[in-house]
Amino acid sequence: MFKLGVLRLYEVCKILGTHEGNIFARNVQMTNDEKNTALFGSLVLMFQTAAMQQMGKMKNQVTDKIERNMEQAQLSIDMLDMLSVKMKGNLTSEESSYLSNALRELKLNYVDEQAKDQASKKETL
C-alpha cells in the first residue's frame, strides 16, 4: 500500500513507469502517453491527498492545521470512484492498480474515521 505522506509526483511516475520518475529533468521529451500517465497519477494523488486531509489524517498544507470534513472526504473518494468506473478498460495495468490501491486505502481510512465518530458518540451518551 502506498504511504501518502512520503509519496511525491516523481514517485508516482516511477510506479506508473514514466521516465523512471525523472519528469523534471531538463531536455527530457515525454511522449503524449507518458505525459498523460504522469497527469493521471497527479490527478489521483491530488484527490487522494485531499481526502486524507479532509479526514484529518494529514495536515492541511495551507492552514498548517489538522482539519476534518467527512462530507468533503466522501466527495473526494466518490470522484476517484467515478474515474475508476468511467475509465475502466482504458487504463494500463499500472494505472488501474495505482487507482484501485488509492481507493482501497481511502475507503479503509474513511471506515476507520466513521468508527471513531460512532465510538465517540456512544461515549458522550
Image: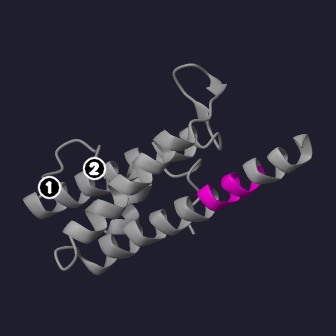
Q: Position of residue 1 (x, y in %)?
A: 57, 69
Q: Give the distance between the C-alpha atoms of the residues marked 1 and 2, in whole angstroms.
A: 8 Å
Q: Position of residue 34 (x, y in %)?
A: 18, 61
Q: Are the two marked residues, 1 and 2, in contact with CB atoms closer than 8 angstroms?
A: yes
User: What's the amino acid at mark 1?
Assistant: Met
What's drawn in magenta, residue-wise? 110-116
Q: Is residue 107 part of the magenta span, yes or no?
A: no
At x 32% / y 49%, what residue is drawn? Answer: 42
66 left or right of 9 in image? right
Q: Secondary structure at mark 1?
A: loop
Residue underneath mark 2: 23
- Number of residues whose C-alpha sits closer than 10 Å to that of mark 1, classed few (under 14), some (14–19) or many (20 or more): few
- Number of residues whose C-alpha sits closer than 10 Å to that of mark 2, classed few (under 14), some (14–19) or many (20 or more): some
Specify the quadrant of the image occupied by residue 97.
bottom left
Q: Position of residue 88 (x, y in %)?
A: 22, 76
User: What's the amino acid at mark 2?
Assistant: Ile
At x 83% / y 46%, what residue is drawn? Answer: 120
Q: How many marks?
A: 2
42 or 22, which is in the foreground? 42
Q: Is residue 111 above or below residue 89?
A: above
Give the quarter of the figure containing the C terminus. Answer: top right
Q: Secondary structure at mark 2?
A: loop
Q: Is residue 4 above or below residue 33?
A: above
At x 69% / y 59%, what residue is drawn? Answer: 112
At x 26% / y 70%, what residue is drawn? Answer: 85
Main secondary-structure element of the magenta-colored stretch = helix
Residue 117 seen: yes
Residue underneath mark 1: 30
Residue 21 seen: no
Specify the quadrant of the image occupied by residue 53.
top right
